[in-house]
């Protein structure tokens, strides 16, 4: 059967009549790679299925949450039971306390936690709290790290130089972006220079400890320790944005792997089991400043929603109770990376492969990628050919060179073999 996206093409045109760009989050539109996004009809295990009847081995996993695979029967079972009890009460539940307890047990630095609905909300609230706690206004972020779409963090660096923030989007007031200082990831000297100049005004450094939003980039040995040390030296808070890396690179997140204790941690994706839930947590003394315990206001009609809590609870229980879950999925991820790398080499390409736990990434670049500048040197045109060839072969990757890929517990050895074989055909197309 030839690969066609006929129905998706019509659906995309129709969606554009009602929704800006036809999607509710920009990257879904395939603008980076061109073409039509498959409209998804259903998902199960390692597969997603589109409305044209195509099946794909899925390495997007809803951008990270689906670590158990899609429609996991136990998660669905918990959800169905929760659904029968009603969908939202706007009042406290036992589910929230239980999920909070599980996360606090798992994530070393978290002593108290507040649930919100999205990663954006989590980082936005963590910044407010950091500013209130330190009574300072400036924050430091890293070029290429994404923390959601609120004003303070929608800021990029100017050509890698240390700059006062320039808004990344019209509509972000320069007065707000101006409080955001941006430096290159993995460059501790630039960070030190920023602290030397602005140290007394910096409330917090927010960082993806393992960045997954410029493709997957790994911290250089000792780098995160330096970030921790300088924030302590100047009395600024260190916020780990583990919305993506939490329960992904390890059960306890990047902070467990790298043994760094941040002051605050943002979580999302996996903790909602595929439903909208996120959270921020950290040291008790800081978290107790949040209303109603303290004066820092933050609230949410659907925060701690019982369905999201039930899906999150079922997911975390399965992750912690399945023997060697991470070991197995990490080994599968390594096998996949090695297999694709062998195919790349067979076609004469020397690419950059990165793996962090159950996440992986591939840069179409023959140079080491360690920050946003080096990531941007990748051959995007080659990636785009590879991406479309993989899609036609039934492998669903994120539609951008600058996104990570995600493995799940539902992926099988057969999936890995099929993906490696598909990558050979795709590399052949790139080489043409
Ligand atoms: N932080 C990180 C590290 C993310 O990867 C994302 C989303 O991809 C966010 C924050 C924002 O989360 P959300 O899309 O749930 O608002």
Image (cartoon, grey):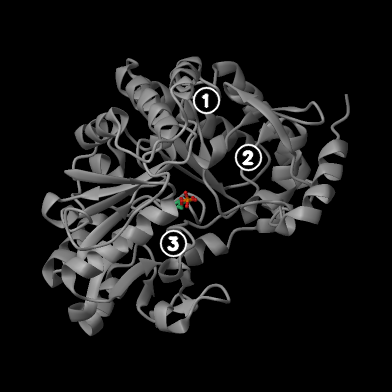
Residue 198 visible in the current orientation: yes
| Residue, disc 3 | 371
Q: Residue at x 79, y 50 (%)?
A: 35
Q: Could you tell me how many numbered marks the image carries?
A: 3
Instruction: Pick the residue in front: 377 or 410.
Output: 410
Of marks 2 and 3, which one's residue comes earlier in the chain? 3
Q: Closer to the camera: disc 2 or disc 1?
A: 1
- CA gap, disc 2 and disc 1: 15 Å
Q: Quadrant of residue 175?
A: bottom left
Dot 3: few (<14), some (14–19), or many (≥20) neighbours within 10 Å? Answer: many
For residue 201, side relative to residue 318 (left or right): left
Q: In which quarter of the image is residue 161?
A: bottom left
**Residue visible at 55% across and 18% down in the picture:** 412
Measured along the vertical axis of the image, is residue 232 above or below residue 58?
below
Q: Badge 2: few (under 14), some or many (20 or more) residues near its Cα, within 10 Å?
A: many
Q: Do the numbered discs 2 and 1 sit on residues whose CB atoms are within 8 Å?
A: no
Percent coordinates x, y for residue 138 in the rendering: 29, 76
Q: Mark 1 points at which residue?
A: 69
Disc 3 within 8 angstroms of ligand 1 (CB): no
Q: Position of residue 58 (x, y in %)?
A: 61, 31
Q: Is mark 1 on a helix, strand or loop?
A: loop
Q: How far apart are marks 2 and 3 (CA)?
A: 22 Å
Q: Looking at the image, can residue 110 be seen?
A: no
Q: Residue 397 carries which label?
A: 2
Quote the CA–CA distance across marks 1 and 3: 30 Å
Q: Where is residue 310 in the image (x, y as percent from the top left)?
A: 39, 27
Is 231 situated left or right of 212 in this image?
left
């Amino acid at each position: 059967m030839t690969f066609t996206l006929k129905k998706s093409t019509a659906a995309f045109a129709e969606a554009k009549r009602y929704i800006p760009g036809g999607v509710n989050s920009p990257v879904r539109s395939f603008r980076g790679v061109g073409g039509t996004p498959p409209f998804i009809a259903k998902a199960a295990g390692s597969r997603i299925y589109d409305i044209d009847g195509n099946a794909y081995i899925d390495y997007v996993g809803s951008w990270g949450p689906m670590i158990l695979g899609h429609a996991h029967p136990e998660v669905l079972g918990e959800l169905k039971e929760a659904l029968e009890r009603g969908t939202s009460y706007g009042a406290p539940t036992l589910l929230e306390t239980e999920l909070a307890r599980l996360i606090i047990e798992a994530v070393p630095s978290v002593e108290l936690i507040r649930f919100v609905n999205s990663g954006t909300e989590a980082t936005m609230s963590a910044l407010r709290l950091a500013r209130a706690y330190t009574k300072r206004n400036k924050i430091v972020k890293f070029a290429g790290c994404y923390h959601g779409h609120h004003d303070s963090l929608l800021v990029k660096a100017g050509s890698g130089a240390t700059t006062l923030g320039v808004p990344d989007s019209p509509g972000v007031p320069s007065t707000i972006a101006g409080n955001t200082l941006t430096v290159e990831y993995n460059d501790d000297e630039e960070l030190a220079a920023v602290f030397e100049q602005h140290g007394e005004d910096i409330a917090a450094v927010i960082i993806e400890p393992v960045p997954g939003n410029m493709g997957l980039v790994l911290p250089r040995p000792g780098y995160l320790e330096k970030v921790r040390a300088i924030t302590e030296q100047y009395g600024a808070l260190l916020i780990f944005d583990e919305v993506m890396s939490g329960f992904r690179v390890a059960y306890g997140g990047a902070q467990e792997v790298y043994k760094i204790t941040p002051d605050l941690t943002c979580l999302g994706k996996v903790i909602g089991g595929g439903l909208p839930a996120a959270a921020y947590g950290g040291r008790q003394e800081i978290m107790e400043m949040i209303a109603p315990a303290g004066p820092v206001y933050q609230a949410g009609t659907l925060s701690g929603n019982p369905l999201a809590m039930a899906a999150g609870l079922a997911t975390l229980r399965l992750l912690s109770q399945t023997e060697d879950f991470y070991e197995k999925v990490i080994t599968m991820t390594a096998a996949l990376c090695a297999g694709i790398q062998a195919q790349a080499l067979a076609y004469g390409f020397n690419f950059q492969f990165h793996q962090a736990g159950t996440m992986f990434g591939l840069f179409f670049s023959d140079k080491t990628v360690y920050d946003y500048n080096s990531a941007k040197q990748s051959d995007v045109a080659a990636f785009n050919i590879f991406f479309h060839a993989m899609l036609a072969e039934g492998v669903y990757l994120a539609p951008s060179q600058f996104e990570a890929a995600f493995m799940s517990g539902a992926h099988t050895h057969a999936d890995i073999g099929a993906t490696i074989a598909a990558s050979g055909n795709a590399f052949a197309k790139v080489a043409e």
